[in-house]
Image (cartoon, helix red, strand yellow):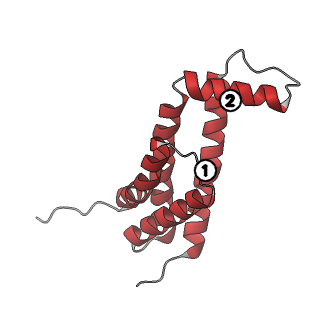
């Protein structure tokens, strides 16, 4: 197997995690309009979280934007490495799956499984997008 740049994978994965954190935070605040207030207790915040997750379009948006960050992670790893893009996309996907499994919840639902099985294909697709187009032969 060709050598994979651990630096490229680490930078891309951390970037993907930061992007996911920011996106999910912004989405939560958007969908929790009016339910959040300063000085909330942990119980109150948990109730707001439950309301946002159960009664809004938060989950579909989080899934779509999470897929976009996974594609972006594969793209970034391939661009930083500048070689064997598909292997770097695969590496990002594997790291993403391992990270997801490490944080896996026993009460995971269907969307959690969908996210898990789509991680590697999305990250490889991102690496595919990073390839420079080959000009047609004349």
| Residue that numbered label 1 is attached to | 105
Q: Is residue 77 visible?
A: no
Q: Does residue 15 sit above or below 24 in this rendering? A: below
Which residue is the extreme one toward the front? 106
Identified at 47% across, 32% down, the residue is 60
Q: Picture coordinates of residue 125 (x, y %)?
A: 36, 56
Which label was assigned to residue 128?
none
Identified at 54% across, 46% down, the residue is 108
Which label was assigned to residue 49?
2
Which residue is the extreme one toward the left? 138
**Dot 2: element:** helix
**Dot 1: element:** loop
Identified at 49% across, 66% down, the residue is 94
Which residue is the extreme one toward the right? 39
Alpha-carbon neighbours of circle 2 within 10 Å: few (<14), some, or many (≥20)? some
Report, in whole angstroms, how far the alpha carbon at label 2 lies from the one at label 1: 16 Å
Where residue 138 sits, quadrant-wise, is bottom left
Q: Picture coordinates of residue 18 (x, y %)?
A: 65, 50
Q: Picture coordinates of residue 64 (x, y %)?
A: 46, 38
Q: Nearer the viewer, residue 27 or 44?
A: 44
Q: Relative to residue 17, is residue 40 drawn left or right? A: right
Viewer-nearest of discs 2 and 1: 1
Alpha-carbon neighbours of circle 1 within 10 Å: few (<14), some, or many (≥20)? few
């Amino acid at each position: 197997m060709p050598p994979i740049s651990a630096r490229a994978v680490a930078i891309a994965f951390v970037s993907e995690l930061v992007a996911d954190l920011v996106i999910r935070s912004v989405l939560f605040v958007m969908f929790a309009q009016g339910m959040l207030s300063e000085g909330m207790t942990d119980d109150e915040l948990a109730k707001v979280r439950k309301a946002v997750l159960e009664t809004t379009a938060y989950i579909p948006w989080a899934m779509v934007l999470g897929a976009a960050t996974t594609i972006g992670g594969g793209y970034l790893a391939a661009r930083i490495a500048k070689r064997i893009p598909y292997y770097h996309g695969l590496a990002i996907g594997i790291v993403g799956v391992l990270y997801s499994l490490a944080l896996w919840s026993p009460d995971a639902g269907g969307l959690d499984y969908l996210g898990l099985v789509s991680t590697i294909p999305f990250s490889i697709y991102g690496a595919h997008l990073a390839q420079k187009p080959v000009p047609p032969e004349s």
